[in-house]
Image (cartoon, grey):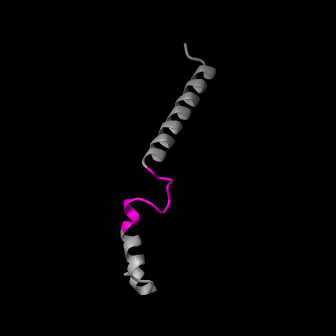
Amino acid sequence: MINRRKLLLGLGSFAVVGTGATTWQAVDQGVFSTGSGAAYVAWDERWRTSHLPLDIVA
């Protein structure tokens, strides 16, 4: 029979492993590397060709 202590230990272990796996995947995919990657290529190209604020927004 499962008592409260074993249940909480199991759920806590599952939460720690799940959080670790999610963090590992986020780091591996570059989620925390701000300002780099494919999403910023268009921004970088636009910024190099023009420095006018309206051109950057366009």
Q: Residue at x 38, y 76 (%)?
A: 46
Q: Residue furthest right?
A: 5
Residue 52 point in image, percent of width and height: 44, 86
In magenta stretch: residue 39: yes
Residue 50 in the figure: left or right of residue 14: left
Residue 43 point in image, percent of width and height: 40, 71
Residue toward you, 4 or 35: 35
Above-or-below relation of 43 to 24: below
Above-or-below relation of 18 to 49: above
- So how many labels did they put on this image? 0
Residue 31 point in image, percent of width and height: 47, 52
Above-or-below relation of 14 to 32: above
In the picture, residue 48 is in which quadrant?
bottom left
Residue toward you, 31 or 36: 36
Most common SS among magenta residues: loop
Q: Residue at x 40, y 83 (%)?
A: 50
Q: Quadrant of the N terminus?
A: top right
Residue toward you, 30 or 4: 30
Residue 32 in the figure: left or right of residue 58: right
Q: Residue at x 46, y 46 (%)?
A: 26
In magenta stretch: residue 3: no
Above-or-below relation of 43 to 9: below
Q: Residue at x 36, y 70 (%)?
A: 42
Q: Residue furthest top?
A: 1
Q: Quadrant of the C terminus?
A: bottom left
Give the residues in magenta.
30-41
